[in-house]
Amino acid sequence: MIVVDASVAVTWVYDDESDARADAALREVIEGGGLVPQHWHLEVRNALLIGERRGRITPDEIRERLSGLDELSLRTDADPDLGEALELARLHNLSFYDAIYLELARRRQAALTTLDGRLSRAALAEGLQTLP
């Protein structure tokens, strides 16, 4: 099971974006499931709303893509260790939102998939596996 950053999921839903790392993460989620923090749902929807405002995606496409995401085996973790996340944010100079992904991966001893270089480096510094 892997922790999936919103940056990866957004790549899955846009037709004009392609990334080999995101494709590999999607295969991993399909085969073994994934974990996301609660705010992942907000981040993904916000990215899609911004895309709609920029003319990249229509409201109907958003509904369709969100339905597709809902069909994936993604479990939402609702019990982050906020104190630990704050410490990780300080240690690795991350946003608190990104530190929540790192905290979840550490707590669940799961690999992390992200397109964010800083978050990926922080995961490696914490001894976590990153995909791919």
Image (spheres, rainbow, N blue to C red):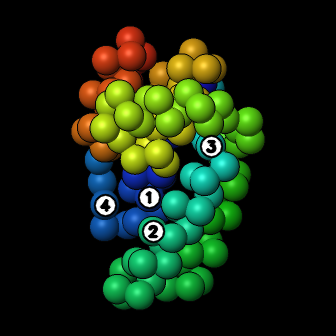
| Residue at the disc numbered 2 | 47
Question: Which amino acid lies under the numbered mark 4 shown in the image of this protein?
Answer: Glu
State if disc 3 and disc 4 touch (CB < 8 Å): no
Q: Give the Cα separation between the discs numbered 4 and 1.
A: 9 Å
| Residue at the disc numbered 4 | 17
Q: Along the polypeptide, which appears first: circle 1 or circle 2? A: 1
The residue positioned 61% from the left and 41% from the top of the image is 36
State if disc 2 and disc 4 touch (CB < 8 Å): no
Tag 3's secondary structure? strand
Q: Residues within 10 Å of mark 1 (few under 14, many from 20)?
A: some
Question: Which amino acid lies under the numbered mark 3 shown in the image of this protein?
Answer: Pro
Q: Give the Cα separation between the discs numbered 1 and 2.
A: 7 Å
Tag 4's secondary structure? loop
State if disc 2 and disc 1 touch (CB < 8 Å): yes
Viewer-nearest of labels 4 and 3? Answer: 3
Q: Residues within 10 Å of mark 4 (few under 14, many from 20)?
A: few
Q: Give the Cα separation between the discs numbered 2 and 3.
A: 16 Å
Residue 110 image offset from top left, x and y in percent: 55, 20
| Residue at the disc numbered 1 | 10
Left or right, 15 with respect to 63, comes to left
129 or 89, which lies in front? 89
State if disc 1 and disc 4 touch (CB < 8 Å): yes
Viewer-nearest of labels 4 and 2? Answer: 2
For the C terminus, the image quarter is top left
The residue positioned 61% from the left and 71% from the top of the image is 64
The residue positioned 36% from the left and 41% from the top of the image is 94
Q: Residues within 10 Å of mark 3 (few under 14, many from 20)?
A: many
| Residue at the disc numbered 3 | 37
Residue projecting furthest to the top: 127
